[in-house]
Image: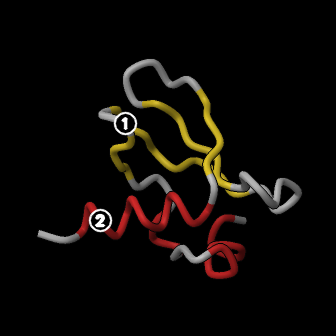
Amino acid sequence: MFALLAEQFGLEAADFEREFIAGGERFRITDIDPRRPKYPISVERIPDRRGFKFTADNVAMLLNAQAKP
């Protein structure tokens, strides 16, 4: 499901389970839910696996910033 929806949310299929840092904490992408247009990206915080929801733009920005040297 993620691979089918990723592009319409500005992500790539390969971003599934990618990790990123936000607010000094590590997160992993776990799902996309198109029924939540404002916060469609589901993630889990790495240390405790607690779930959070992010905007697609925010996740794309964080992934891009992390990819730059």
Residue under circle 2?
65
Please give the label number shown on residue 55.
none
Q: Residue at x 26, y 61 (%)?
A: 66
Indicate left or right for 67 with 31 as reference: left
- Rendered position, 11 above or below 52: below
Q: Amino acid at mark 1?
A: Gly
Frontmost residue, 34 versus 39:
39
Residue 23 marker: 1
Q: Amino acid at mark 2?
A: Ala
Q: Secondary structure at mark 1?
A: loop
- CB under 8 Å between discs 2 and 1: no
For image coordinates 24% across by 68% down, the residue present is: 67
Q: Residue at x 81, y 60 (%)?
A: 37
Q: Residues within 10 Å of mark 1 (few under 14, many from 20)?
A: few
Between the residue at mark 2 and the residue at mark 1, the CA separation in whole angstroms equals: 13 Å
**Residue that appears at 39% across and 59% down:** 62
Please, is residue 35 above or below residue 44 in the view? below
Provide the secondary structure element on which disc 2 rests. Answer: helix
- Which image quadrant for residue 1? bottom right
**Residue 14, position in %: x, y?**
45, 71
Colour mode of the rendering: secondary structure
Q: Quadrant of the C terminus?
A: bottom left
Q: Position of residue 56 (x, y in %)?
A: 61, 63
On the picture, is 5 further left or further right than 69?
Answer: right
Q: Closer to the camera, 38 or 19?
A: 38
